[in-house]
Amino acid sequence: MKGKIAIYSGTFDPFTKGHEDLVRRAARLFGRIIVAVADSKSKRPLFGPDERVAMVREILRDCENIEVKSFSCLLMEFLRQHGAQVIVRGLRAVSDFEYEFQMAGMNRSLHPDVETVFLTPGEQYMFLSATMVREIASLGGDVSKFVQPVVAARLRDRFGTATA
């Protein structure tokens, strides 16, 4: 699989240590990983796509085979544009499986040559979600265990809190 290009997509609002864990492990399996930051206007993200891309690039700057790009088209179109053959998805709990399984089937029907690979995060990140991190930060809680310092600083700035 070292010669394959894989896409790890998401809104990453914000990029958590769970996301980081998955992409770093995927980078050991594939020749190149593209972290695809979804524009996702419909989700009304806290951070704009350029801000999210900048944070992810800062966190993963030490990884030579990882690129970070934003996208606003269908994921299958983004894969075609970049010659990728694999989608990497994270599964934290059984509750993630049904949705991810449906998405993998739909993606396969759109592009039969693309495979979806599921990875589970380290056990310390199984409970972690960007939604929970945003909620904790919005209420002034300390999220430093869940995100890298660059993300914690942006959350503090966004919410105007002393912690985050």
Image (cartoon, grey):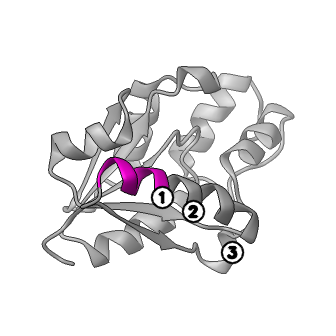
Query: Under tag 3, what secondary structure?
Result: helix
How crowded pointer 2 is (Cα within 10 Å; few <14, some 14-19, many 20+) is rated as: few
How crowded pointer 3 is (Cα within 10 Å; few <14, some 14-19, many 20+) is rated as: few
- Where does the magenta region start and end? 105-111
Specify the quadrant that holds the C terminus.
top right
Specify the quadrant that holds the N terminus.
bottom left
How crowded pointer 1 is (Cα within 10 Å; few <14, some 14-19, many 20+) is rated as: some
- Which comes before the other along the chain, label 3 or label 1? 1
* Mark 2 lies on residue: 101
Q: Is residue 21 above or below residue 122?
A: above
Query: Seen in the image, is 60 located left or right of residue 33?
Result: right
Residue contact between numbered discs 2 and 3, judged by CB atoms under 8 Å: no
Q: Residue at x 73, y 70 (%)?
A: 94
> Residue 45 shows which numbered tag?
none
Residue contact between numbered discs 2 and 1, judged by CB atoms under 8 Å: yes
Nearest the viewer among 109 and 162 is 109
> Residue 105 shows which numbered tag?
1
- Report the number of numbered marks: 3
Q: Amino acid at mark 1?
A: Gly
Q: Is residue 25 above or below residue 87?
A: below
Q: Position of residue 113 (x, y in %)?
A: 24, 61
State whether the magenta stretch is mostly helix, strand or loop.
helix
Does the image show residue 17?
Answer: no
Q: Amino acid at mark 2?
A: Phe
Residue 107, magenta (yes or no): yes
Q: CA distance from mark 2 to mark 1?
A: 6 Å
Q: Residue at x 65, y 34 (%)?
A: 155
Q: Position of residue 52 (x, y in %)?
A: 46, 34
Q: Position of residue 47 (x, y in %)?
A: 55, 26
* Mark 3 lies on residue: 124
